[in-house]
Image (cartoon, rainbow, N blue to C red):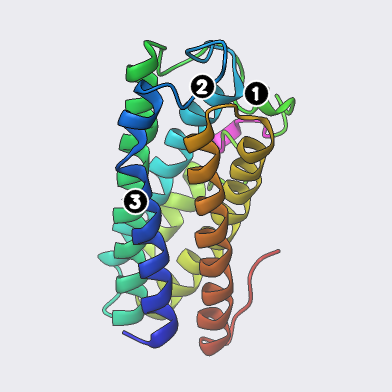
């Protein structure tokens, strides 16, 4: 493991350690003054939308893990899959704790005032998400081509995730949720920088 990859893995682990106190903190009153967040609140909207967003990152990471033997890419994919799967469980756990539904009739990003920003066609429900066509393409590639396409897709995915997490930092009212969202911003921005370096090593660049 190179030093930078190790630092990012450590940062991601720190986010998860902080998440360990979430259930206690929210149940103990570390939330909005009015009590449990409403179903249409930013807190609930972020938890629902980011859980969906994270699930796709996990899916892409498992795909590339089986499409390359490169240890650096496989290690990054493993770290992303583990971190985001755990965070997804935490987000859904909050909704259970609050007694709120995990799905909503509202369009994705409504809680950010950005409903309709992503057209939802071909499976891309939120900014940064890959389309179903892109996922099938990733599954069809191998070796260096798979590595490059994964790094490009995940860079876009992280940029969308950072935007959403920053929205929670600004709009959410549960203190610990805001802290975890900021941790997501910090970790994913670091991974974006790392992936830019990994793409450069492979003679490629981010798509945007």
Q: Earlier in the sequence, mark 2 or mark 3?
A: 3
Mark 2–mark 1 Cα distance, whole angstroms, equals 8 Å
CB-based contact (under 8 Å), mark 2 and mark 1: yes
Whether residue 142 is visible here, answered yes or no, is no
Q: Residue at x 29, y 43 (%)?
A: 20
Name the disc covering residue 167, or none: none
Residue count near mark 3 (Cα–Cα under 10 Å), binned few <14, some 14–19, many ≥20: many
Viewer-side label of 3, 1: 3
The vertical placement of 100 against 91, above or below, is above
The vertical placement of 141 against 204, above or below, is above
Whether residue 8 is visible here, answered yes or no, is yes
Examine the structure image and report whether residue 198 is included in the region drawn in magenta. Answer: no
Please provide the residue range marked out in magenta: 118-124
Pick the front one: 187 or 153:
187
Q: Quadrant of the image for the C terminus?
A: bottom right
Mark 3–mark 1 Cα distance, whole angstroms, equals 24 Å
Residue 27 position in % (x across, y down): 35, 21
The vertical placement of 137 against 75, above or below, is above
Q: Which of the 4 image quarters holds residue 102?
A: top left
Circle 2 sits on which residue?
44
Circle 3 sits on which residue?
16
């Amino acid at each position: 493991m190179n030093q930078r990859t190790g630092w990012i893995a450590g940062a991601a682990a720190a986010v998860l350690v902080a998440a360990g106190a979430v259930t206690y903190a929210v149940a103990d009153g570390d939330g909005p003054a009015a009590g449990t967040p409403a179903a249409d609140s930013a807190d609930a909207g972020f938890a629902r939308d980011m859980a969906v967003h994270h699930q796709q990152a996990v899916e892409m990471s498992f795909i590339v893990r089986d499409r390359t033997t490169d240890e650096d890419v496989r290690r990054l994919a493993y770290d992303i899959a583990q971190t985001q799967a755990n965070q997804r469980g935490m987000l859904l756990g909050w909704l259970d704790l609050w007694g709120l539904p995990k799905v909503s009739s509202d369009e994705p990003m409504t809680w950010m005032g950005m409903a309709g920003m992503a057209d939802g066609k071909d499976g891309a429900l939120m900014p940064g998400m890959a389309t179903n066509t892109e996922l099938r393409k990733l599954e069809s590639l191998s070796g260096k081509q798979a590595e490059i396409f994964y790094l490009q897709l995940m860079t876009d995915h992280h940029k969308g995730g950072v935007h959403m997490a920053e929205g929670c930092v600004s709009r959410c009212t549960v203190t610990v949720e805001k802290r975890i969202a900021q941790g997501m911003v910090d970790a994913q921005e670091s991974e974006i920088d790392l992936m830019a370096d990994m793409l450069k090593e492979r003679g490629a660049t981010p798509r945007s």
